[in-house]
Amino acid sequence: MTVIEAHNIRKSYGSLEVLHDVDLSVEEGEILGLIGPSGSGKSTLLRLLDLIEPANAGELSVFGIDTVADHGTWLDLRRRMGMLFQRPIVFNSSVYDNVAMGLRYRRAPGDNIDRKVKEALEAVGLSRYIKSRAIDLSGGEQQRVALSRVLVTDPEILFLDEPTANLDPTSTATIEAIVTRLNREAGMTVLISTHDLAQGQRLADRVGVMIAGTIAQTGPSREIFREPKNQQIARFVGVQNIIPARVVSRRGDFTVVEAREKEILSATPPPAEEVEMVVRGEDISLHRRKPGYEEAENLFPATVTAIEPTAPFVNVTVHCGCDLVALVTARRAEALGLHEGMEVWVSLQAKAVHLIPRAER
Amino acid sequence: MKTETLSGDPLREDDEGTPSWWNGRWRRQVDWCTVWFCIMGGLLVGITVLALANIATTELADPAHLLKVAASSQVIESILLTFGAGASAVLLLILFGTPLAYVLARSRPSRFKGVVESIVDIPLILPHTVAGLLVYLLFMRRGWLGAPLSEIGLAFEDALPGTIIAMLFVASPFYVNTMREGFEKVPVHLENVARTLGAGTFTAFRTVTLPLSLRHMYSGALLAWGRAIGEFAGVIMIAYYPFIISTLIYYSFTTDGIHTSRSIAFTVILASLAVFYLLRRMTRYLGRYDDRV
């Protein structure tokens, strides 16, 4: 079942357009990650979807109810959802009162509140702080209070707006674990926005990339990271090699492209004449001598021109007509004895070479 | 140097023309900027202190007359009336000014908002007589609002409602602006959190924004009240009667002379100071500021 369906959403603040042409549908029980650079409109989109603010234009239905036509149901719909913000926000009262807020707004009976608050604090591991003042806790603990404050209301959809951006790794792990468990056990639908690519990949079943106020691509994270639709997305998802090339022919199932007179095979059908090769650094393997057996379709010699350590990996630039950046582990780089000017063999699967139409400049 | 100062001979100091403490730590620690600022500020405070001392010494020299005037039913009634009318004006301001302040605090800048802000500030920049005249013309028996309201039996000319409405008019910017400042200091984030937790707009306002702005509401109300009870020119235009305290002082000044009016004035000073001091002290028990994120 589709729980959120948005079409052509537009939102602007004064003359500043924050969102435009946003299309998104979210299935019940999935974890959708929204990734994108800061200022791309992720937080604004989540606020719109949580019905805190209205959009300027577009269609939005939540739980199958058209929210544009039916303004009166917003509060009821909002009460079926929950949201956790980037900054840990707690109110200056006891942890108990903080967590009870949502239930009190819903006029839940007292003993019910008591039981649920205790359960929720148990779940985030903060039972011992139940009587403490919430603002005395550390940032990570405050964020856990904020999470349990959302969870007591049993939301069907949970919005997480960069929930761990300010937290230490342990608190991050705790919050991620709770969210994944709720998704698996209670079937809670989760929308998480993050600029942490690894977090997006780790948690989400499906990823949406937001660039400059719109959702540029959605799909399984494997697809987003390996087959970005355009150069902007490719850059954002951390592709090291975006190389202009020209399609020259087809060979069997493969497309032959030429970049600076170097022919490379790609498994992508040619999207245009003038293309860009998108190759992730970790898909490029380096060898000391020509491998005896190699299933990779592209195999060619090259010269190492630069070595840049970015622990625990090493970025190795090799020259083979065009420049390619390969990502190898520090240990592997040591084993290969890499040094500048060294001759190496490069192997690259045709599947790892993704082609996109060349962006017009 | 210190021992020298301590064992200093008073006669020798006189010879040098400087007291002993002056050559010691004091001289080295003096910050001339602060000293001059204090002197200049002191002059300002001095005027108030001198004026109060002046009236106090003359009045306290004749306590019998002061007591007689202070205990007269006319003066007591007038003080109570003034304070009461001021309080009514403030209550009306809280009721109508708070929503206005909230809207002004939360809306984005626009030309329309600028116009509304200027309208709110108009009573601040007008001479009080002009403000009084504006109120009079609108609320007099033949005025745009005065006529229909007198039909239903609400008269403003020379009546308490007139006093209150004049006070309301001149005091409104003080309340609205202070309250707005308070609302602006409450982060929208906090309201959004409340709303994501299932609060409606009004519930979020009532449970989050308002408690965090209570201090501003209180000091805004206090400012407005002070302004309201001090009003003279604005009030007499529409309501010469019943006598508010300013009118009474002016009246007795022009009829009985300075002696009586001075005693009334002194009584008012004592009453106002006492009330304001109490109200100011109460602020410290009010509001929760520290949970602003």
Image: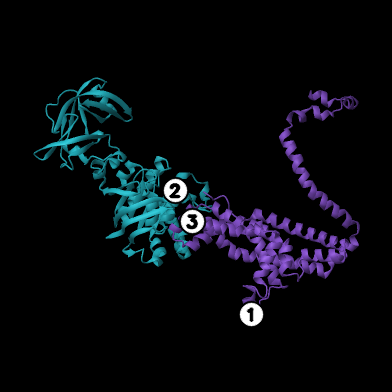
Chain colours: A cyan, B purple
Quarter of the image for the N terminus of chain B: give it: top right
Q: In which quarter of the image is residue A355?
A: top left
Q: Is residue B145 left or right of residue B76?
A: left
Tell me which residue sits at (23%, 20%) in the image: A342
- Secondary element under disc 2, as helix, strand or loop, is helix
Number of other residues with Cα within 10 Å of mark 2, as a class: few under 14, some 14 to 19, many 20 or more: many
Amino acid type of the residue tagged 2 in the rendering = Gln
Estimate the spatial distance between the alpha carbons at disc 2 and disc 3, rounded to whole Å. Answer: 17 Å
Instruction: Quickly name the residue at label 3.
Output: B191
Comparing A123 with B59, the one in front is: B59
Q: Are marks 3 and 1 in contact (CB under 8 Å)?
A: no
Amino acid type of the residue tagged 1 in the rendering = Glu
Instruction: Quickly name the residue at label 1.
Output: B151
Whole-percent x and y of residue B227? 70, 59
Residue B47 at least partly seen? yes
Tell me which residue sits at (80%, 27%) in the image: B23
Residue B87 at least partly seen? no
Instruction: Quickly name the residue at label 2.
Output: A143
- Secondary element under disc 3, as helix, strand or loop, is helix
Number of other residues with Cα within 10 Å of mark 3, as a class: few under 14, some 14 to 19, many 20 or more: many
Q: Which of marks 2 and 3 is in front?
A: 3
Report the disc number at residue A255: none
| Pointer 3 chain | B
| Pointer 2 chain | A
Whole-percent x and y of residue A292? 12, 26
Q: Quadrant of residue A172?
A: top left
